Image (tube, rainbow, N blue to C red):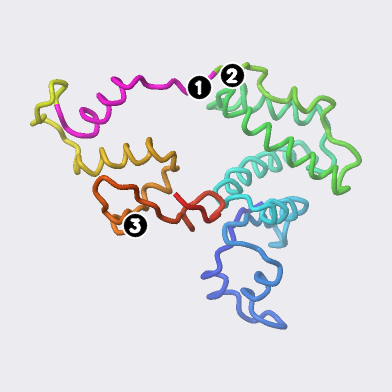
Amino acid sequence: MDLFFVKRPLVDRYGDGLPGGTAVALLDRRVIPDGTPVVLGPDMRPTEPLCSWFRHLAYLGRDPETMRSYAYVVLRLAEYLVSRGTDLLAAGEVDLLAYRRQRLDVQAVPIDPVTWDREAATVNGLFAWMTEVGHRRHGPLRMPKAYGSGMAHGMQVRHLTLEQYLFFRDVGLGGQCPGGEVDGGFRGGFPHRNRAAAELALMTGMRKREWSTVLLPELARRPGGEAGFTLQACAKYRRRREM
């Protein structure tokens, strides 16, 4: 199986010749967004039910990067099941338990339990959808929630104190010594920009891909006053919101 992702410029360049219109027009009619994963079999035809599941995720508005990570997870599982002489439609509980052992213990570089829990959630989501739409009469696992690593995850985020944050901002990003002097050995670049980015992220709650695209004209450069601007393509799910 081979994994591809929809990209309209490439489709427009190489997809001519379809009856009834161009390949891009077909994607538009089907409302298939760029970034949607497509799995092709040895005969270069779409592999089901994976392609239908990815289209379902695209219709739900899933982010392309999210779908990309899902795609690699389920493709690994599908290829493993083929090696055991089965597939997603016929796999049983023992097949999935063997796959979990393969990922956590047997393979050359086992993954950690946190990574596996994310993969298990994706696998459970796929089989839940397959059961819901009728591809399977029931899921392969008697207790899907138990398919994770079983490790209880505590809080993974530890908040900085104000003193710790100011040290990180001024020394780590701003190129100062702990006493406030300029650190001549600082090897970073653009300390004022770096400090401004940290302040912007902390004070607004914007995500990295949101604040990293903000331009000075958008802030209107009003000293002492508030600045408001609109997030569009860089916002999560590309949903427009005011900041």
Measured as percent of width and height from the top left, residue 97 is found at 75, 26
Dot 1 or dot 3: first in sequence order is 1
Q: Nearer the viewer, residue 195 or 77?
A: 195
Please, which residue is most extreme toward the right here? 137
Give residue 218's mark.
3
> Could you say where residue 102 lies in the image, as x and y percent from the top left?
65, 27
Q: Which residue is mark 2?
A: 153
Instruction: Specify whether residue 157 is painted magenta.
Output: yes
Residue at position x 75%, y 30% from top? 96
Q: How crowded is the residue under tag 2: few (<14 C-alpha within 10 Å), some, or many (20+)?
A: few
Instruction: Name the kind of residue labelled 3 in the image.
Output: Glu
Label 1 or label 3, whichever lies nearer to me, is: 3
Q: Residues within 10 Å of mark 1 (few under 14, many from 20)?
A: few
- Percent across and percent down for residue 73 are 63, 40
Q: Which residue does the numbered mark 1 point to in the structure image?
A: 156
In the figure, is residue 113 to the left or right of 127?
Answer: left
Position of 224 with respect to 125 (left or right) is left
Amino acid beneath label 1: Gln
Separation of marks 2 and 3 at Cα, in angstroms: 40 Å
Q: Measure the alpha-carbon separation of dots 2 and 1.
A: 8 Å
Residue 37, compared with residue 14, is above or below; it is: above
Mark closer to the chain start, 2 or 3: 2
The CA distance from mark 1 to mark 3 is 34 Å
Q: Is residue 85 magenta?
A: no
Identity of the amino acid at label 2?
His
Q: On the picture, is 224 further left or further right than 157?
A: left
Q: Nearer the viewer, mark 2 or mark 3?
A: 3
Tell me which corner region of the image, top left, top right, bottom left or bottom right, holds residue 146: top right
Instruction: Read off the magenta span.
Output: 155-176
Contact? badges 2 and 1 (CB < 8 Å): yes
Taking the image as shown, residue 233 lies to the left or right of residue 151, namely left
- Which quadrant of the figure has residue 175? top left
